[in-house]
Amino acid sequence: MRRIEKQQMFEKFQNETGVSSEEYYMAYKRVKRIKGFYTHLIVYIFVNLFLIFDDGFDNISFEHFFQWHTYSTAFFWGLGLLSHAISVFGKDFFFGNDWEERKIREYMEKEKVKEQNWK
């Protein structure tokens, strides 16, 4: 997307919602970081699948699939991918800010449905 198109998109969005340019810029940066993470994830999956199966087809026996060096690249790259995920999604990667509250509501709603079904 060209810079002029981005600017026009922002102006239209700002007119409709009233957000400031700083808020928009922060949201734009966040979306770019998330997109970068998902691109990294897709490359990780395809490259490691290729490496594992390419190495496996070079060696006819299936014993090769159970050796450490077959998965070592995926393991260490996976650690890097995990750190990338944490840097993008923050420290609340697993549970989020309102995770406890959402879970409590979910369980309360399940109990409410159970009670309604018994009546």
Image: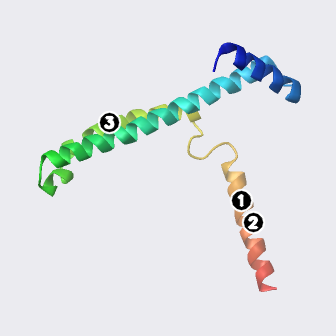
Mark earlier in primary sequence (2, 3): 3
Relative side of 47 to 20, left or right:
left
Q: Is residue 26 above or below residue 41?
A: above
Determine which residue is flagged by label 3: 76
Q: Which residue is mark 1?
A: 104
What's the residue type where badge 3 is placed? Phe
Apparent side of residue 93 relative to residue 102 in the rendered image (left or right): left
Callout in the foreground (2, 3) = 3
On the image, numbered disc 2 is attached to which residue?
A: 108
Circle 2/circle 3 CB separation < 8 Å? no
For marks 3 and 1, give the one nearer the viewer: 3
- Residues packed near mark 3 inside 10 Å, few (<14), some (14 to 19) or many (20 plus): few
- Residue 21 image-quadrant placement: top right
Residue 81's quadrant in the figure? top left
How far apart are the two marked residues, 3 and 1, measured between alpha carbons?
36 Å
Image quarter where the N terminus lies is top right
In the rendering, at what x and y percent does residue 61 appear?
A: 12, 55
Helix, strand or loop at label 3? It is helix
Q: Are marks 2 and 1 in contact (CB under 8 Å)?
A: yes
Q: What kind of residue is marked 1?
A: Ile
Q: How is the image coloured?
A: rainbow
**Looking at the image, which is closer to me, 101 or 110?**
110
Q: So how many labels did they put on this image?
A: 3
